[in-house]
Image (cartoon, rainbow, N blue to C red):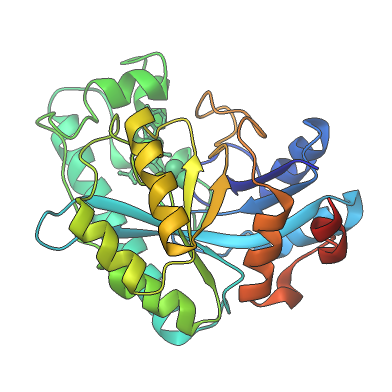
């Protein structure tokens, strides 16, 4: 049984519709996926009907943008099976989308001084209501033939050290964990040791996140460093955390392939046990426990 608990559709910065992501899972022989678009649940309904139609297992989720206070290190908190109408969490991710949009506007203003792009080029390549991110700016730069790929844009003008980069505030991951739990969801820290993306949280910050009620850590993710994975494994053992593995699929927007990392059936069973189980589509928990 192949389970991939981290994917994106064009509701955030993936390149395919939610239904297409589900269809791709079927093609890739992945039995269960979680749809975890950045800061919103707008893709859930479409993904759920595709999952029912195609018999693909679906765990609705979201990836909440956070920032560790003090160090200002960026943290992504996966939330599975939370009540999508929980007021405080909905408000928080709404704010995150607003601040992402403001930040993207400012980055495009800076880029426009040196490259032939403007804000309309970014929105033209973005679905209505999508959570805007640097990948959409990258797409506009590709379209303008400034770079050949998202990858190249991230290595160059979209890099945090580039003069065009603008940061944006986001909630404390400790608060995100508390809020996700309050919404009946299951908080799993995404790629906690992705040192190639930038600085990663300190041991003290990580422990504070665990103490707040973290359920699990995404260890098998291509961006986690080898020493980082070893550290996460011992933390998971000591604190009884759920261990997950995922692709972080973004369609053609990233080389990550569906099912390139997977989560064990028993780990998914634990997630479902701790979340709003009625949100799951086409997943048989008894089968997970038997697998
Ligand atoms: P943002 O959240 O707007 O700062 O942009 C970060 C997003 O860009 C992450 O969610 C990643 O999925 C994506 N990303 C990061 N690095 C790359 C890359 N090298 N190529 C394509 N997408 C990337
Ligand atoms: Fe992304
Ligand atoms: Fe992420
Ligand atoms: Zn992601």
Residue 51: x %, y % from top left: 81, 54
Please tell me which residue lies in front, 158 or 82.
82
x then y, percent, for residue 95? 32, 70
Please tell me which residue is depicted at 34% across the width and 24% down the height of the picture: 141
Quarter occupied by residue 43 = bottom right
Q: Is residue 110 above or below residue 45?
A: above
| Residue at x-position 28% and y-position 34% | 195
Left or right of 80? Residue 140 is: left
Residue 105: image location, x then y, percent? 24, 48
User: Could you say which is closer to the camera, residue 228 or residue 276?
Assistant: 228
Compared to residue 270, the image places residue 53 above or below, namely above
Give the quadrant of residue 139. Answer: top left
Seen in the picture, residue 217 relative to 111 is either above or below; the reply is below
Query: On the rendered structure, is 9 left or right of 99?
Result: right
Q: At 38% across and 78% down in the image, what residue appears? A: 178
Asked if 254 appears above or below 36 in the picture, the reply is: above
In this view of the protein, can residue 245 be seen by the observer?
yes
- Horizontally, residue 161 falls left or right of residue 99, namely left
């Amino acid at each position: 049984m192949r389970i991939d608990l981290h994917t994106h559709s064009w509701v955030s910065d993936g390149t395919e519709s939610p239904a297409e992501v589900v269809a791709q899972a079927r093609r890739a022989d992945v039995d269960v996926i979680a749809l975890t678009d950045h800061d919103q649940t707008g893709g859930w309904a479409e993904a759920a009907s595709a999952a029912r139609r195609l018999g693909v297992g679906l765990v609705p989720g979201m990836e909440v943008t956070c920032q560790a206070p003090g160090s200002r290190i960026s943290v992504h908190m996966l939330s599975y099976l939370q009540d999508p109408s929980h007021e405080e969490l909905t408000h928080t991710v709404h704010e995150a989308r607003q601040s992402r949009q403001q930040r993207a506007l400012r980055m495009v203003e800076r880029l426009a001084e040196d490259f032939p792009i403007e804000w309309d080029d970014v929105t033209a390549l973005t679905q209505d209501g999508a959570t805007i991110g640097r990948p959409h700016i990258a797409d506009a730069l590709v379209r303008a033939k400034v770079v050949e790929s998202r990858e190249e844009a991230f290595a160059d003008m979209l890099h945090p050290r580039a003069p065009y980069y603008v940061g944006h505030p986001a909630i404390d991951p400790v608060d995100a964990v508390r809020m996700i739990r309050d919404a009946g969801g299951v908080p799993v820290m995404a790629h906690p040791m992705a040192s190639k993306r930038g600085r990663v949280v300190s041991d003290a910050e990580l422990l504070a996140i665990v103490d707040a009620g973290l359920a699990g850590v995404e260890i098998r993710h291509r961006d986690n460093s080898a020493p980082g994975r070893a550290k996460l494994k011992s933390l998971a053992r000591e604190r009884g955390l759920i261990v997950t593995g995922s692709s972080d699929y973004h369609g053609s927007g990233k080389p990550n392939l569906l099912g390139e990392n997977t989560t064990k059936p028993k780990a998914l069973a634990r997630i479902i046990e701790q979340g709003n189980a009625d949100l799951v589509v086409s997943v048989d928990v008894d089968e997970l426990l038997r697998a």
